Amino acid sequence: MNAAHLHLMFNHLSLVGMGFAILLNLLAVFGKSVDIRKLSCWFYILVGLLAILPVATGDGAGEIIKNMPGVSKDAIEYHETWGYLFFYGAMAIGLLAIAALWYTRAKEGVLKKFNLAMLVLAIVVSVFAFQTGTTGGKIRHSEIQLQH
């Protein structure tokens, strides 16, 4: 297994994880369970940590693939830009989740407001996640490039 394999495996964990975190957060915002609200925070922290892995393996994957026929260095750079936007967004949500858990340990009533803020931010960051996945797929998946 090389860096390209690891990069593909790890990026799916964080991208799909963000989707699950958003679904869980929807339950937290519209439900009444404080435990679900806290679990949502922990899941955002996990996604933030998982987002480190594709960044850590991205350069190695780029080195492996950059000289292959049909691979555009511009496509790799474009993908990297979106990847960093997703990474920093996931980190911001993870830090907000840590702040929410710390700040609300004595004031659980405020946790719902934190969950709402995380949800809004996560929806924006999910656009970055979508673009990261799409631009990464276009590097080697020519069928994606057929879209107009």
Image (spheres, rainbow, N blue to C red):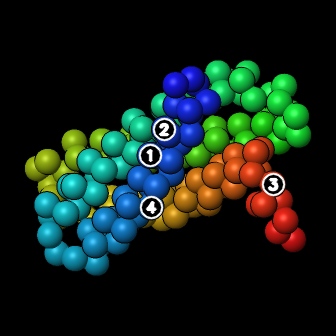
* Mark 2 neighbour density, 10 Å: few (under 14) some (14–19) many (20 or more): many
Q: Would residue 16 be found to the left or right of residue 43 on screen? A: right
The residue that mark 4 highlights is 19
- Name which residue type carries label 3: Ser
Residue contact at pointers 3 and 4, CB within 8 angstroms: no
Q: Which residue is mark 1?
A: 13
Category of crowding for the residue at label 3, using alpha-carbon neighbours closer than 10 angstroms: few (below 14), some (14–19), many (at least 20) = few
Task: Kindly report the distance in space between the C-alpha atoms of the residues bearing marks 2 and 1.
Answer: 5 Å
Tags 2 and 1 in contact by the CB under 8 Å rule? yes
**Which is nearer the N-term, disc 3 or disc 4?**
4
Q: Amino acid at mark 1?
A: Leu
In whole angstroms, how far apart are the C-alphas of marks 4 and 2? 15 Å
Residue 134 in picture, x, y percent from top left: 69, 55
Nearest-to-viewer mark from 3 and 2: 3
| Comparing labels 4 and 2, the label whose residue is closer to the camera | 2
94 relative position to 104: left or right = right
Callout 1 secondary element = helix
Quarter of the image with the C terminus is bottom right
- In the displayed orientation, state which residue is furthest to the bottom: 30
Q: Which comes sooner in the sequence, label 1 or label 3? A: 1
Q: Which residue is mark 2?
A: 10
Which numbered disc flags the more N-terminal residue, 3 or 2? 2
